[in-house]
Amino acid sequence: MMSSMLARGNRFKTLLQGSIPAPLQGILLALVSTALFVWVGVIVRILSDSVDLFQILLVRQVVFLIVLIPAIAVSLDVLLKPRRMHLHLLRISGAFAALYLGF
């Protein structure tokens, strides 16, 4: 299953590289990421009236993890050997605090 996901990802990457110039790819990715960020913010604001914020953030991170599974699978050996663990823990703590306090 994982190999088929990676194969699809490589086909998508090859398709984009051949048809869309690199600067336009960057612009499109920036626009899509901005739109998704705004969309997530709106959904969190709407749901925060009826659902606990911690649950919203948990589901958000699980979805994010599922989306990143192909990239994680490709570079798992590097990800399991961090060189500066204290900086990773600081980054994770800061990101959680920013998400929890920001919404």
Image (spheres, rainbow, N blue to C red):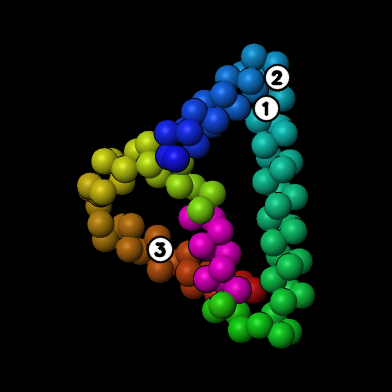
Instruction: Please tell me whether mark 3 or mark 2 is closer to you in this view.
Output: 2
Where is residue 3 drawn, in percent x and y? Answer: 42, 33
Q: Which of marks 1 and 3 is nearer the N terminus?
A: 1
Q: Position of residue 59 (x, y in %)?
A: 56, 68
The reply, left or right, for residue 83 in relation to residue 34 is left
Q: In this view, does 35 lie to the left or right of 13?
A: right
Q: What stretch is highlighted in magenta?
A: 56-65
For badge 3, the amino acid type reads Ile
Residue 53: image x %, image y %?
A: 60, 79
Chief secondary structure of the magenta portion: helix
Q: Is residue 94 magenta?
A: no
For the point 48% across and 33% down, the residue is 4
Q: Which amino acid does label 2 sit on?
A: Ile
Residue that carries the numbered disc 1 in the rendered image: 25
Is any part of residue 73 visible from this angle?
A: yes
Q: Name the residue under label 2.
A: 20
Residue, far front: 1
Relative to 40, does residue 55 appear above or below in the rendering? below
SS under mark 1: helix
Query: Spatial distance from mark 1 to mark 3, Cα to Cα?
Result: 29 Å
Q: Give the mark, 3 or 2, whose residue is nearer the N terminus.
A: 2
Q: Compute the Cα span from label 1 to label 2.
A: 6 Å
Q: Mark 3 points at which residue?
A: 92
